[in-house]
Each structure stands twice: as structure tokens, then as C-alpha cells.
Image (cartoon, rainbow, N blue to C red):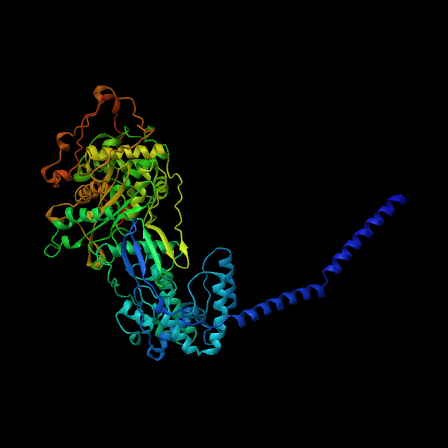
Amino acid sequence: MGRADARRAQAQESRRAAKSGGIRRLFTWKKLLGTFFGIVLLGMGAFGALYLYVDVPAANAMAERQSNVYKYSDGTVLARTGKGVNRQIVDLDEVPKKVQHAFVAAENKTFYKDQGVDLKGTTRGVLNTLSGKGKQGGSTITQQYVKNYYLTQAPTVSRKLQELVISLKIDQQMSKDEILAGYINTAYYGRGASGIQAAAQAYYGIDAKDLNVSQGAYLASVLQAPSQYDWNSATDTGKKLVKERWAYTLRNMVEMDWLTESEKAKLEFPVPQKPKPAAGMEGQTGYLVEAANKELEKQGVSAADREAGGWTFTLTVDKKRQQALEKAVDDQLESKLDREGNKVDATVQAGATSVDPKTGKVVALYGGEDYIKHYISNATRQDYQPASTFKPLVLASALENESETQDGSLIGLNTVYDGTSKRPVVGSDTPFAPQNQDDRSYGPISVQKAMNSSVNSVFAQMIVDVTPAKAKETALALGVPDKNFPERPAVTLGTMNASTWDMAGVYATLDNHGQKVTPHILQSAEHRDRTVNPEKPKREQAISRASADTVTKALTGVVDAGSGGAANSPAYDAAAKTGTSEDNKSAWFAGYTPELTTVVALFGEGDGGRKQVSLTGTANSGRASGSGFPARIWADYTLGALGGGSGKTFDLQDVERGEVPAPPTPSDTPSEEPSESEEPTPSDTPSQTPSETPSETPTTPAPPTISPPATTPPTSPEIPPLPGDDDGQPGERPGGNGAAQQ
């Protein structure tokens, strides 16, 4: 290296050293510590100023509480709630000691030792509020009491900081017993109950002084999520979570030496009594208000927020259409039932949901005979099977996936299947051989005609051709809930669980050319302090327009020449599907016009809602199939809701006709007419009235559109077909990896 190079290297090293020294001088430990302590002192000073500035306010005085108003879409009043506060203050010494401890164990184990605040939890809550993640748990009992009694439920940073300061002051001014008493007397427990006395009455029909430790632990647990954890309206997940919360509370009591392990072991989960609806919720009003409240929860308006009062909730429900739906149920069903003198009639429950297929707005809803008499909403309950209303979704999946039959034919409306009753499916690892309605065999039959007559054997084979996994994927995309939904051939008969609300969304999506429709009932929520704008549902394409329109074409055939004949009218263009679940426990009619989608269902409910029973014998009419009462209710309502009819017709594009193999030689051509041995015997003849009987009868189609069925293996003695019900719905054989869901 030359001298010049050495000098350059030395100069560069000097510059690096100077730069490094400058950084070290800038960020010395003394300066870093000084900066840190400066920030801490500024924060302490700011907090000190805040502490001095924020006074303990007067109580948020429930005397100023306002009622909530629920309105129809046209602005007319549907209901007023919360005119008074369901609260009765009780002294803490009236509450059993173990029940007091249950609340502390559930919410704040350090309550008797802390200074009234949880800085970590409060900081987390503030950060989540700032980042838009919503509310976050972690507050102490003192903080929750302050929020309930002095402040509001608004999830703002300023409210959270006020809560922190006031809690510190309250902890200094009041005893722990006074704070605990204030907390349990102001907290909201659900069922319209504020305070432990009202909660004890609402959940167990007793006074707070008579609560046992198990009941107290439940009430302490339900505070975390009153709507989700109310046992009588909770989902399976909600029930699981509240049981876990109850057990967690008891474990904490043992840990704190407030309960012995042997005492805990003897305790059983205290299932609460059925709720008693509030006055003014009679008829359909309570069902509508309940549906709106559930949607409010999803939109971030909690039960506690709502119960604070002062809200105006406008629903999407059309008053005239709501009245038309109620009248249709009364005229076509209730007027024909003898609920007092007929044991079957006493078990019949009707439910319906009607949706605008363009917007998803719920324009009418029928939850049951009377909210006061029947608390469970039949419109939103998900404990029954949608039955054969699921078959169009199997076709939709076949079209969407361009599925082929076992002989390689593209599936469409003209594709021919073997409609033999009890025919074992081909190509499935799970044996399945469903019986058609009345054990009727159709021989070679097109998909269109199979849809008209709801031929089980055809759709059992079709779901195998599509694969149950792909059919489920399509169904979930359309809006079917993932409840008891195994990927097996039997689901082609609708053996999962769904509500009329769910299926209305599914069929509205088909009506809307495959663009996803999500039913919603909340139009707006306004308060003097805030306005909640409901989230607009996403408008993604669930399936292609061609697939959706092809299914609609198939379903117009069900109305024109199939099991949906009761809804056939020159007053409107309609598409629909009937369904009757196993043992006739539910009966469905899901249909739509270009302007309106409505799903009507009947449910056989026994033992106070704890048991599903058969509808057979309803109004002394034999089988209560989907083509009977549900179809007639649908037709009556639709005519009224459309003001006597509509001239609009379905705008269908790219309808898939499907492929049909070349016809066989005449000598080999099978006839679609049943042979003498295939004719139904007198005992197999359908017992429905003509309006309930599918008008479709097998006929011999023209040669170009017929082909022999796929090779059908003989029925194996190892796979005995199961007897069917009204729609011929059996379950899979127990040896075939699963039985139908009951």
C-alpha cells in the first residue's frame, strides 16, 4: 500500500471514530436516563393534574333513564321498552357470604387487597380502544361499579381515563363492602334485570337472600356476556362457555379458601328457569325485538348499552308485509288447529322469514304463536333439519364445480339419473341407499324431473358425483350454517341444522343471481350520545350467475309441475322447493319471486321444547309435508305481500342444460314407465290431499333426451335400505359411518 493510500485509510478511520464518538455523546446513559425520567415525571404530572381535575360525579341517575323505541321501516312505532328499571337495591348482608365471594372469585380475586384499579388491564383497554379493537376485559370490580353507577358504557378513551381516576378516589372514600354492594346492585345480568335481586327473580324465581353458592356462581358468570350466557337462549357454544366460566368461578373460590374441595364436588350446574317476557312483547312483537337485539350485539351495542335507554331502533320490517305474514299463518294454519283438544296440534310450531333478495332486508318474520307463550323464536332457531330444501344446493355445487356423472356426463337439468328407490350410490366409501317418497321408483329420470318430485335416489348419487366436501363448501358459501354438517352422502337430504332465517338468506342468494345475500333486520340505531350505522353486508359472488340461474330454472319446475304446486299462481313468477325431515319432525317450503324470498317451516315440538316430535296428524290431515301447510302459507303471504301479484319475471341467463349420452339401440332402451311390479301398491299410495301431492309422474321422454341409467349394482344384502318418511328420508346405515341427524 502506498503512502497516499495509507493516508486515505487513516482519514476514513478518523471520520468513523468522530462519527461514533458523536453518537455516543448524543446517546449517553445519563442522557437516556434523564429523558426516561423526564417522560415519567411528565406522565406523573399529567396524571396528577387529571386526578385533581376529575371529581367523583353524581350518579348517572337512573331517574333520567329513557325508554327505548323500536320502529317499523316506515317510522311507525312497534314497541317501547325499558320505561322503568327492573332493579331493587338490597343490602349486602342480605346476600349470602358465599354468593358475595362468588362474584369476587369470578371478576376480581384481588378485590379485597387492590387499590381499586388494574393498571395493566386499563392500559390494555385504552390501547384497544385507540386501535379500534373494541372493549377489553380486565377492569376491577371497583372500575366496573364506577362505569355502571357514575359513567356510561361508551367505549372511549376519555371515559376509560375518568373511570381510572374515579376508581382510585372511590376506593379511598368507600369500604370494600360498600363497593361490592354497589357493584352487584347496578350490574346488568340479562333478561332485563339490573341488580342481583332482579336477577335472582329472573333466573331462579327467588330472592337474592335465598341464592345458593351454585346459583350465585352462575349469576356471577353470566355478567361476562348476559345474552350469550343465558342458558335458555344460548347456543351450544354459549352453554359450553358459561359452564366453563361457572367452573372457573368455583375453582377460584377453592383457591381463595372460600369453598372446600368437597363442597365444590357436590355442586351441580344450576340450570335457570325459563325467562318471562316483558309486558308489551305479546304476539310477534317480542320476536322482532329479540331479533333486532341479537343483531345489535353483533354491531357492538351490548345489552348493558341498550338497557341504559334513550335509543331509537328502526327495523327493516315492512309493517304491511308483517301483517300479511301473520294473517297467512292464522288463515292457513292456526285457524285449522285444535291446540287444546288435539295432542298433535298442540306440538305444532310455525316459523318464517321473508327477505328482500336485493338488499337482504328482513321485511317480515314469524316467530311463533305468541312470544309470551312460546319464548323460542321459530324463525331463528337452528335445531331442526332443513330436509330436501338442501337438494337445490347439491345441484348448485354440481354446476359450480362442473361435476360429471359416473359415466362422464356434465351435470345439468337434462342429465339423466337412475331414480330407482333404495338404489345404492356408486363411487362412495360410505354406503347409502335412500328410499324415495312412498318407495316409488322412477327409472331413468332427468335432473329437472327429479327436482320436481324430490327424488332422493337421484340427489344421493349426485352428491357423490360432486363429492360431499365440495357440496358443503358451496352450501357454506351460500349461507348454510356449519351445524351438525358432516361430509357424507346423507347430507344431500338436508340432515344438518338451519333456521328459516338461514335458508331465506340461501334462497335469496339464488334469487339474486348468486350474489351473496345476508339477512339483516336492523336499519338504524340512534342515541342522543351516539349513532350506530349497521355494517353493510359484503356483496361477493357466492356462486356464478349461470349456476344460480340454472337452479332457479329447476325450481320454477317444482312450482309449475312438481311438489310446489300449491304455490303455483298466474299472479307471480315463482321458484321453490319443498322439504320434510325424517319422521316428519319438520316441514319446509322455501321459495321466491323476483322481488321476495320467503321460507316457511313447521316444527314438531314436544316436552316444552326439549324434544322433537312428528307432525303427522296435524289438523287431522295426515302427513304435514312441505307441500301442504307451509306451501299454502307461503302462497297466501306472497300474494298479499306483492299487493295481489307482480308482473316481474325471472331474468335467467346461461342456464345449463347438461349433457345426455347418445341414446341406446331401441331394443336396449329402458322405459321410464314403471313396470307392474314397480307400481305403488295401495298401501304405498300417497295419503296427501291433491294440493300436497307432487303433480310430476314419470313419463317416457323423447329419445334424444334419454339415456340408460348408470350401471346400477344390485342391492347388497349387507346394505339394507332404511325406511323413509314423508320425503323418504332415511339416515345412512350405522355401519355406513353415520346416521341421519335427528
The image shows a total of numbered marks equal to 0
Residue 72: x %, y % from top left: 29, 51
Task: Indicate whether 552 appears above or below 107.
Answer: above
Residue 537: x %, y % from top left: 39, 45
Viewport quadrant of the N terminus: top right
Asked if residue 461 shows in the view, the reply is: yes
Task: Indicate whether 634 appears above or below 16.
Answer: above
Residue 737: x %, y % from top left: 31, 46
Q: Residue at x 18, y 33 (%)?
A: 696
Task: Indicate whether 430 appears above or below 560.
Answer: below
Quadrant location of residue 571?
top left
Residue 661: x %, y % from top left: 30, 24
Asked if residue 721 shows in the view, the reply is: no
- 494 or 20: nearer the viewer: 20
Q: Residue at x 40, y 40 (%)?
A: 540
Residue at the extreme right of the image, as rendered: 3
